[in-house]
Amino acid sequence: MSSHIATQAVHAGEERPKPYGAVTTPIVQTSTYAFVDTAEIMDFMHRKVAGDEPLRHEYGRYSNPTQTAVESKVAALEGGEKALLFASGMAAITTTLCALLSSGDHLVMVRDAYHRTWEFALTFLERWGVETTLVPIDEPDTLAAAIRPSTRLIFSETPANPYLGIIDLSRTVEIAKKHTIITIIDSTFATPVNLRPLEYGVDLVIHSATKYLGGHNDLMAGVVIGPRSVLTDIEEARGTLGGVSSPHDAYLLLRGLKTLEVRVLRQNDNARRVAQFLEGHPAIHRVHYPGLPSHPQHDLASKQMTGFGGVVSFEIEGDTGRTSRFIDLLRLPYVGPTLGSVESIVQQVAAFFSLDREEREAAGIKDNLVRYAVGIEDAGDLISDLSQALAGI
Ligand SMILES: Cc1ncc(COP(=O)(O)O)c(C=O)c1O
């Protein structure tokens, strides 16, 4: 198999020949797989006990052929040994943390992680005796100082929501390796087209595949990629906790993945053009985009990433009402809480985050902050639309 991501996106994980000579991988819509006789069951069970990869399927909560095809494709795209598919990004994150952490362990997490991720750490994990220290994404020395003898995991996103902060992967891995700590990167915003964290020595990569990997706003899924030795425990936990992807969602994801590189390159380009337009506009207070030299971590992002992604955040000059009016005047993007699809999606971050001002302030969410996740539309059309909305406020 070629190591080029465009070829892998189309062909990796795809059996040849497929049943009936089909070009596309079938949706195997079954919950259970029947055995022909006891000898086949015994053979299956012996392989399982020996820790060998199973040659067949048993029950839908453990595996499914459509799901297996997605897992092989995503593992190839991230350059990992193995991948596990889940019902959502949060199912991937919570199952992984449950599998790898025990009471008495300590977790270091960046403060800019997706809010449900740190909420899970500060509520559920805390209740079960796992302590979490939140650290700023751009302060490796603070991260290093947070390490304790009981620290088992470092969890970060990059770029992180909503200010597009970047974590220094080489420094983080260096700190982690010194203390034998597992590193996990939620790479949802980057995608393997722009960043391959495993190449930096990161142990596990997680995606909300609901976003760029699926790319069409028509499925929920999550994925974890890494070495077989670590994924075995997470696979066991998935079998128990049950957050598996349905065969139909797995098929949609397989289909979406084939165009991943084409979509993401277009979104990188659209976002750069939108960010440049906004940065020069008098109604904009500030633009946050790692591809702009004005981003405080632009040099790090340029060194670490091959593209800067499709999300641009920016602050509207003036009172909060102007930000809401701007959102309401936009004609092209949908207004909603997601990102990564072919359709542009926009949100006033505060509106979806919390109605409680103190909570917003504690999380650093400014009321004039807009997150614009560009789609694959024509960049000129997106900019004309932004221009008319800004003129109208
Ligand atoms: C960076 C990031 N990680 C994880 C998630 C959770 O993924 P899902 O919505 O697929 O559960 C999200 C969702 O918004 C996200 O933005």
Image (cartoon, rainbow, N blue to C red):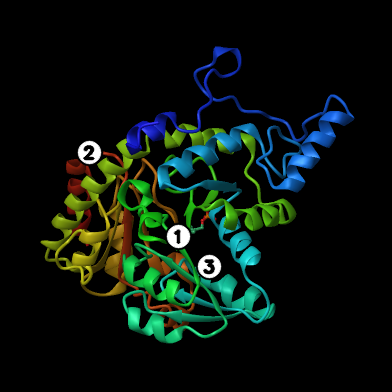
> Which residue corresponds to the image point at 57% horizontal and 51% vertical from the top-left?
228
Badge 3 marks a residue whose secondary structure is helix
Number of disc labels:
3
Three-letter residue code for mark 2: Asp
Residue located beneath label 2 in the image: 378
Residue 214 at least partly seen: no
Mark 1 sits near ligand 1, with its Cβ under 8 Å away: yes
Q: Which corner quadrant of the image does residue 365 belong to?
A: bottom left
Q: Give the image location of residue 55, x and y in percent.
A: 68, 33
Residue located beneath label 3 in the image: 117
Q: Which numbered circle lies on residue 156?
A: none
Three-letter residue code for mark 3: Thr
Q: Residues within 10 Å of mark 3 (few under 14, many from 20)?
A: some
> Which residue corresponds to the image point at 66% horizontal and 36% vertical from the top-left?
64
> Which residue corresponds to the image point at 53% horizontal and 50% vertical from the top-left?
223
> Which residue corresponds to the image point at 17% horizontal and 59% vertical from the top-left?
278
Left-right relation of 323 to 220: left
Nearer-the-camera pick, 47 or 234: 47
Closer to the chain start, of discs 3 and 1, is 3
Q: Residues within 10 Å of mark 2 (few under 14, many from 20)?
A: few
